[in-house]
Amino acid sequence: MKRELHSKLQDKAENYLLAKGYWICMQEMPSPMGYIDVWGLSRANGFKSMAIEVKVSRSDFKTYSQRIRNDRPEAMANECYILCPAGL
């Protein structure tokens, strides 16, 4: 169930980027910090990139939050967001 929810939220994030005019979007994008769940590049915004991380469990969210404090999130994209289910 968790994997299905993760995949559903990745699709939702990709559709969000496409609706915002990001012309290159991909899931599971490799980066210096690991794999980005959804990544997009916008031609309209001066080739800025956006990364969306999907978190479906509290423990995954906490682990990611601790790692992001120690690493450089700017290595992922110009803008970085976390998408999680309501109530998480």
Image: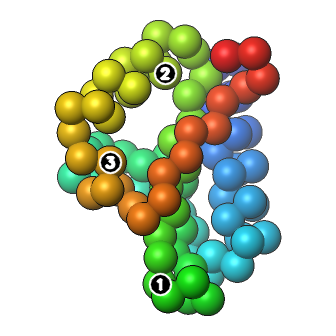
The reply to whether discs 2 and 3 touch (Cβ–Cβ < 8 Å) is no
Above or below, 82 against 18 in this view is above
Left or right relative to 17: residue 39: left
Q: Looking at numbered disc 3 in the image, what kind of residue is underneath it?
A: Pro
Residue beneath the point at 55% across and 12% down = 58
* Residues at discs 1 and 2 in contact (Cβ within 8 Å): no
Q: Residue at x 21, y 32 (%)?
A: 70
Of the two numbered discs 2 and 3 in the rendering, the one whose residue sits closer to the viewer: 3
The residue under label 1 is: 47
Q: Is residue 15 left or right of residue 79?
A: right
Q: Amino acid at mark 1?
A: Phe
CA separation in Å, label 1 and label 2: 28 Å
Of residues 79 and 39, the one drawn nearer to the viewer in this rendering:
79
Q: Which residue is mark 2?
A: 61
In terms of sequence position, does the residue under pointer 3 or pointer 1 come before the other? 1
Q: Is residue 30 visible?
A: no
Q: Mark 3 sits on what residue?
A: 73
Spatial distance from mark 2 to mark 3, Cα to Cα? 15 Å
The residue that appears at 32% across and 34% down in the rendered structure is 68
Q: Residue at x 22, y 52 (%)?
A: 32
Q: Amino acid at mark 2?
A: Phe
For residue 71, what is the image quadrant? Answer: top left
**Residue occupying the far front of the picture:** 69
Q: Quadrant of residue 16?
A: bottom right
Q: Quadrant of residue 88?
A: top right
Say which label, 1 or 2, has the lower sequence index.
1
Q: Nearer the viewer, residue 86 or 26?
A: 86
Q: Is residue 79 visible?
A: yes
Residue 86, position as x, y percentages in the image: 78, 23
